[in-house]
Amino acid sequence: MVGMVHDAMGIPNISPDVGVECLIGDDTWDGPNEDTYRFLKWLQEAECPLYPGCENFTALSFLVQLLHLKVLSGWTDKLFTMLLELLKKSYPEGVKLPSSYYEANKITIELGFTYKTWDACPNNCMLFTNEDENLDTCDVCKASRYKPIASSASTSANDGKKLPAKQVRYFPLKPRLQRLFMSSKTSLLMK
């Protein structure tokens, strides 16, 4: 789990033998920045047991595995929150689990597991981003951006929101490149 935190924050795994001067170099060092504080916080979380006396899981490893199960099994956010509540009641006092999916998701965002969702043309002609963000039809093939509404029952179930016909999930390039260049091994390969 500690290695996963190192990878997520883009900080190389360094053996305890390496001196601080190797990390700092010849530049003057102003002390840890905000990213370093976040890294140290998550490094501490990665070593913290799920509950006092637990030897099989840390709080972070257990949460990551639960989120993985959610994705693989297609659980809803509500089901995940209900499961967290049940687990908190069933585990001993002092268990370190978030109370809801929202809180668990905030942790994944802090670790850098984020993506952006864009609506796309159902025929793969264009993305509805930037200046095209407010369009209802594709400029190329004139296909509707949204799924057709079948009946009034489905409208009430969706609270009147239009559902996109197709979506694309995009992992932003800038944070990924920053993480790649933070590691000494991958930065040499990137040049």
Image (cartoon, rainbow, N blue to C red):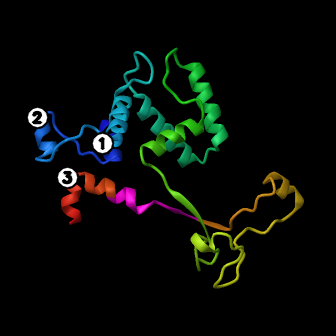
Secondary element at tag 3: helix
Residue occupying the point 70% across, 83% down: 142
Amino acid at the residue labelled 3:
Ser
Residue 65 versus residue 151 in the image, above or below: above
Q: Which quadrant of the figure has residue 160? A: bottom right
State left or right for residue 137 relative to residue 91. right
Q: Quadrant of the N terminus?
A: top left
In the image, residue 172 lies in the stretch drawn in magenta: yes
Query: In the rendering, which numbered label is found on residue 6?
Result: 1
Residue stretch in magenta: 168-177
Residue occupying the point 15% across, 33% down: 16
Give the Cα separation between the discs numbered 2 and 3.
17 Å
Query: In the rendering, which numbered label is found on residue 184?
Result: 3
Residue occupying the point 31% across, 36% down: 2
**Residue 191: horizontal and vertical position, in percent?**
20, 66
Secondary element at tag 1: helix
The reply to whether discs 1 and 2 touch (Cβ–Cβ < 8 Å) is no
The reply to whether discs 1 and 3 touch (Cβ–Cβ < 8 Å) is no
Query: In the rendering, which numbered label is found on residue 17?
Result: 2
In the image, residue 115 lies in the stretch drawn in magenta: no
Residue 1, can we see it? no
